Image: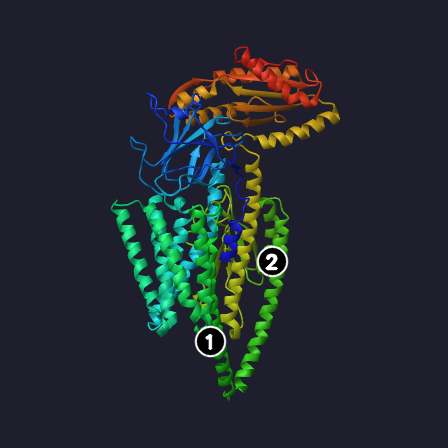
Amino acid sequence: MIIALGVCLSQPGFAAMQLVDEGWRYRWGDSPFQPDGTPLWATEADSGPWQDIAFPSNPPGRKGQQHVWFRVNLSEGEWSAPALYIYSVDIIVQVWLRGGLLYQYGTFDDQGRGKFEGWPWHEIPLPDGYEGETMYFRVFSNYTDIGLWGEVAILDHPDLVLHIVSQSAESLVIAALSALIALLALVFALIQRGQRSFASIALFSFLTSVMLLAESQASLLIAYKPLLWDYLAAGSYYLIPMALALLLRQWLGAARPALISWLVWVHLGLAVSALTLALVGAVDLSSTFPVFDVLLLVSLVLMAGAVLPRFRVLFREQQVLVVACGVLAVLLIVDMAVAHGFLPWGRVPVSWGALGFSLAVVSISVWHYGKTQKELQQLNIRLEQKVQERTARAESLAEREVARARLLALESKKSQKLADVIAALQDCAGIEEAFEPLLKAMPELYLPMTGCFYRRGVDGQYDRVVHWGSAPEDVFPASLGSNLSALTETVLPVRSYDLPAQMCFFLRVESARSGNRPEGVLMLERPDLPPVVKDYGIARVIAWVYQSVEKIGITLSGLALRAELQRFSYEDSLTRLKNRRYFDELFRHEREVSARSDRPLCLLIFDIDHFKQFNDCHGHEAGDQALRMVGDVLGTYFRGSDTVCRYGGEEFAVLMPGASLEEARQRAEQLRAAISAEQVEHRGENLGSLTISAGIACWRENCPEFDELFRAADQALYQAKETGRNRVVAGPL
């Protein structure tokens, strides 16, 4: 299940992204700076020797250069919170847009140089109106590679987080599985001290887990410490060959070559010295990777030469583990080749190599467990053949089985009824509709146990809505109030006498309405079962009741989630008005209705005057408050049949079926006057009032063609702006 979850989350398509893979240009060297601190190369006035490049990484003709500039024109796209995503940069970077510094990672000194500060992914928020602008990248690198690396794309911030999580899910799941195997191997190593291979497997799995976690992009979502994660990745990466050599040394036994032992100490010494020198600042951590990669390649060749001649003498499980380690080694070599530019960039599935090793360990463990279970089963058969006293036990067993069969028949009947209830609930449109068949089915579902069901009302009180059986009022009162602290949710008991006389089960529905509080409470009296199956039967009955309540809660949660998603998909979260998606769908519908009934249809489009200036002056939070104020005013000036939408940014649209042009103009004038009279207040400060410019078009009065209705209203809006703003224009095409 863990592996399947990782595979599903790691599939593409979770996030919409626009790749920036065309139009890149570069030039070697560093730009001179103007007196105001702006680099000359980041201005449109500069027309130096820029050259085309397919991707901004490792341009030709480096010849010891440590500075390079890239630039690209940003294409258009429809985003709500656009950001530029860069997989990685070698080594530090500045991003310039419109002559200003938009983003910087790392510290540049007076000579434009800096130290290595990690290899994180980068998210660069893009300002409004970035489309068509030229973005410049100033890069410094004293590493073997220089420039951007991996992929560069534009996408919304939520989609970026989802993209990072989906791309990292595979590594995270496999890292968790490797950590679990490391823990189990460590436990076995402590129990069976003579088996040293368990300790080596624990070390190998632990290092693999740390490497996968540290190298996954999602690690920065856990803690944004790029250099810390790089140190963890480097340390685990450098020690993996040592753990592999320890495994080989133990498996080869007396025939192990001295070369394997020597490799253990070499890699341990390299890891300790490299990390120590990097921590004290003697070298950059990035400069240690090429040295290790060369040593790793040599070590893998030497270990393969030592193992392959003795492969046949190893045990079958050791051979499987050697093959799994070999696959991981090949993937590490391919990843190394990609990192140093010998192969084109691509995601090398190193985690799958780690997964192969983990599965090999699990498979061997399962095989040993199956073998042990088979031997135990044979032993049980031999012991049972020696049992002499079966007659009395057979009678008791027969009586127990009869009672158990009756209990199973009842359970089967109840399970079928539960399946019918779940199917009926799934056909309902919402929770309120679903509770009607649920309450009707509860007596048949839980009889012969006496009980009742309490549901939480809007006031937070839990009132009894249905009851069955002959329980007195003092057992199941008409209301539980709002305090549930005295109730305890009954789970599967160990002994029958652990059960109280009344058992309660909480029906939890995950929705915005219920929160963390139960939506309902099911209370039942303890079942009365025959003594021969009392412990076993009560346990099964309570477990079934618990599972049935859980299934009903999950089904109701699905209905609630579906309703909430339906509402959120058509609603603007800031103004609580309908969004553009809803408007587009409704506009097509109203068009068909108006054309069929020959009923007029008016469209009002308006936006807030000088809203960008308002934002720049008072901040985006004040701008959001202004938009909310406009949304509140809109709700009071239009009919219930009119549809008010936030079309995008500070632009709003109102669709008025059946309204004449004059009626629409009067409402627009009232709206304009109301908004100009309303004061915008933010954090206790009066920010003044706003004005709007509006354009109106009406089919058929001033727009005979239906397809031109939106364009006519939009032209009227622009005419209102050009004639001085703060006005309503209802002009013809």
Judge from the rendering whether residue 256 lies leftward or rightward of residue 150; answer left or right: left
How packed is label 1: few (under 14 Cα within 10 Å), some, or many (20 or more)? few
Observer-nearest of 111 and 365: 111
Q: Position of residue 181 (x, y in %)?
A: 41, 62
On the rendered image, what quadrant is the C terminus found in? top right
Are the residues tagged 2 and 1 within 8 Å (C-beta)? no
Q: Which residue is mark 2?
A: 418
Q: Position of residue 306 (x, y in %)?
A: 40, 67
Q: Give the total number of marks visible in the rendering.
A: 2
Observer-nearest of 272 and 142: 142
Judge from the rendering whether residue 259 lies leftward or rightward of residue 613; answer left or right: left
Q: Position of residue 720 (x, y in %)?
A: 56, 13
Give the numbered dot on residue 582. none
Q: Secondary structure at mark 2?
A: helix
How packed is label 2: few (under 14 Cα within 10 Å), some, or many (20 or more)? many
Q: Position of residue 600 (x, y in %)?
A: 70, 21
Q: Residue at x 70, y 22 (%)?
A: 706
Observer-nearest of 400 and 200: 200
Question: Which residue is outermost to the top?
Answer: 723
Observer-nearest of 611 and 216: 216
* Residue type, mark 1 in image: Thr
Is 594 above or below relative to 163?
above
Residue 493: image quadrant is: bottom left
Q: Secondary structure at mark 1?
A: helix
Judge from the rendering whether residue 106 lies leftward or rightward of residue 501; answer left or right: left
Q: Which residue is mark 1?
A: 372
Q: Is residue 197 visible?
A: yes
Q: Residue at x 60, y 66 (%)?
A: 410
Is 249 above or below relative to 467?
below
* Residue type, mark 2 in image: Leu
Mark 2 or mark 1, which has the lower sequence index?
A: 1
